[in-house]
Image (cartoon, grey):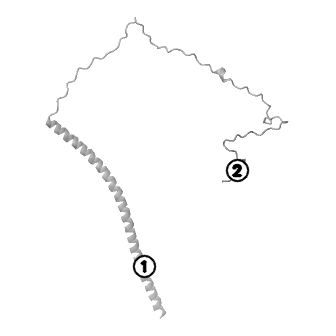
Amino acid sequence: MSQSSADNSIPLLTEVIAPPAAPENQAPQALQWEDTQPQQPHPQPDYQQHFQPEPIQAFQPQYQPTYDAAPLPVSVSTPLPPQPFAPEPSAEQLRQLRQDIQENVMQTLLGQIDNVLHQHLQDHLAVILDNMADILKTRVRASLEQALAETVTQALAEEMAKFENAKY
């Protein structure tokens, strides 16, 4: 693949572009506003003079008990007496518990099923009713067009008959 001569002037990413050299007899000029006076150059800030690291101090806890200090009072709650285990439910209680849980789950599920069915029926009925409305509109329009065409044909025939009778 050959490159054109115009591509030779485009620098590549690996090339270093040197700034244009100023003529030797000309000193660099600073840009100045016409209405301002030349300013003195600002001294470079010395960042080291402002940064003074704080001396590192060992961690000193706020409370330092001594070995001969009196112990601090600590509030201790009395333990609760052990609770006896509940007696095992009888077979009748287990059966009643199962039945109650089953009824609650069934009521919850039936309520959710009712909501889902209601939403699905609404969606499907909306589509069906739109289709039925389109079909009904098409049929009524066709019937109306046919009735209108027959009425215009009959009216034209009557007018033509009057015109023919009027000639004689």
Between 35 and 13, the one lying in front of the other is 13
**Where 150 sits versus 137, above or below?**
below
The residue sitting at 27% across, 18% down in the picture is 79
Between 3 and 25, the one lying in front of the other is 3
Give SS at disc 1. Answer: helix
Q: Is residue 62 left or right of residue 117?
A: right
**Where 69 sits versus 34, above or below?**
above
The residue sitting at 27% across, 44% down in the picture is 108
Give SS at disc 2. Answer: helix
Residue 70 percent across, percent down from the top left: 38, 7
For label 1, the crowd category at 10 Å Cα-Cα, with few meaning under 14, some 14 to 19 and many 20 or more, is few
Quadrant hosting residue 54:
top right
Quadrant hosting residue 29:
top right
Residue 50 percent across, percent down from the top left: 65, 21
Q: Which mark is residue 88?
A: none
Between 6 and 127, the one lying in front of the other is 6
Residue 143 percent across, percent down from the top left: 38, 74
The residue sitting at 44% across, 88% down in the picture is 161
For label 2, the crowd category at 10 Å Cα-Cα, with few meaning under 14, some 14 to 19 and many 20 or more, is few
The quadrant in which the N terminus is found is bottom right
**Where 53 sits versus 29, above or below?**
above
Kindly give the residue lying farthest to the front in the view shown: 1
Ranked by sequence position, the earlier of labels 2 and 1 is 2
Q: Which mark is residue 7?
A: 2
In this figure, which residue is indicated by the disc labeled 1? 149
Find the distance from the CA under tag 2 to the CA under tag 1.
78 Å
Q: Is residue 149 left or right of residue 18?
A: left
Amino acid of disc 1: Ala
Quadrant hosting residue 155:
bottom left
The residue sitting at 35% across, 62% down in the picture is 128
Amino acid of disc 2: Asp
Residue 121 percent across, percent down from the top left: 32, 56
